[in-house]
Amino acid sequence: MSFENKEGQNVPSATFKIINEKGLQSVESDSLFKNRKVIVFSLPGAFTPTCSSTHLPRYNQLAKTFAKDGVDEIVCLSVNDAFVMKSWGENQEADNVTLLADGNGEFTEKMGLLVDKSDLGFGKRSWRYSMLVNNGVIEKMFIEPDKPGDPFEVSDANTMLNYINKDAKLPHAITVITKPGCPHCKKAKELLASKELDFEEIILGKDATSVSLAALSGSGTVPQIFIDGKKIGGNDDLQKHFA
C-alpha cells in the first residue's frame, strides 16, 4: 500500500468529537485550522504501547518548545470514540495536547490513511503519521513507511521539531523531590521557575516515602534535584549548578 503525501493541499473538512467541561462537543476542522499553525499526529489507538510510552508523551513534553516557534495547538488524532480519548488523556496527563476523536474515520479516510487492522481486532484505524498545518494547508507530512506491524520512525515529536526549527533547544528532564513545609525546597523550585525550567515534583508523604529518597539520592535530606539523569543534589548544589 502506498500513501499519498498531501503537502500543499488543503486539510480535509471533517467533524471531530471531544469531551470537555460542557460534555460531548463537536469540533469542525475549519475552526481548528483556519488562521492557525497546528501540529497533528495520528496513531492507531489510545492506550496502545507505542502511542502511550513514546508518541503522545514526547509531543506533550515538547509543547512549550513548539509554541516558541508559533505553533498554536498540538492535536492527537485517533479513530477511537471521544470517551476513550478523554480517558486516555487523563491517564497520560497530557495537558498540553488536544486529543480528538475521529470516531467514524471520516477525516482519516479523506487523508487516505485509513487502514484495516482487523488482524488485531481493531477494525479500521489510522496509519501513523504527523503533519504541520498552516492556515488550513498541509505544509509538511511525515508518514510512517509501509512496513508490517506499526512502524514508528518519522512521525515522532523530535522529527517534527527538527523540521520546524533544527536549532531549537530541547527541554531538560528535571525531577525535584520535596516535602511539605520545606523552605529549601521552595527556594529550589523558585530558582527553576526563574530559569523557565519545567520540572516534575515528587512530594514525600504523598507520591513517595523516605525509602525512595534514600534509594534514588543516597541522601535523607530534601530537596533532591535530578537533571537529565544526573543527580544535582540539594538547593545549594542547584545554586552552584546555575552559577
Image (spheres, rainbow, N blue to C red):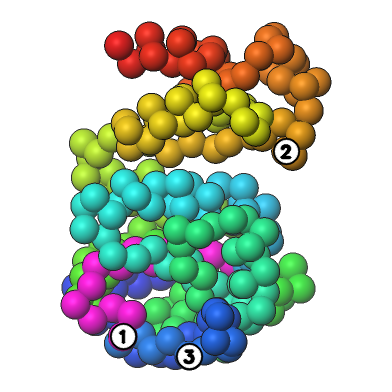
Amino acid marked by disc 2: Asp
Q: Residue at x 41, y 31 (%)?
A: 190
Please say whether residue 16 is one of the residues in the magenta stretch: no
Labels 3 & 1 near each other (Cβ < 8 A): no
Q: CA distance from mark 3 to mark 1?
A: 11 Å
Q: Residues within 10 Å of mark 3 (few under 14, many from 20)?
A: few
Judge by depth and name the residue closer to the eye, 116 or 88.
88
- Location of mark 1 (residue): 31
Q: Residues within 10 Å of mark 2 (few under 14, many from 20)?
A: few
In screen coordinates, is 8 left or right of 23? left
Location of mark 3 (residue): 26
Q: Which element is circle 2 on?
A: loop
Residue drawn where x is 71% and y is 31% of the image: 204
Q: From which residue to which does the magenta span run?
A: 31-44
Residue 223: tell me if it is visible: yes
- Using the rendered view, name the quadrant where residue 6 is placed: bottom left
Q: Does residue 201 appear to the left or right of 91 in the view shown?
A: left
* Residue 181, quarter of picture: top right
Q: Position of residue 128 (x, y in %)?
A: 50, 63
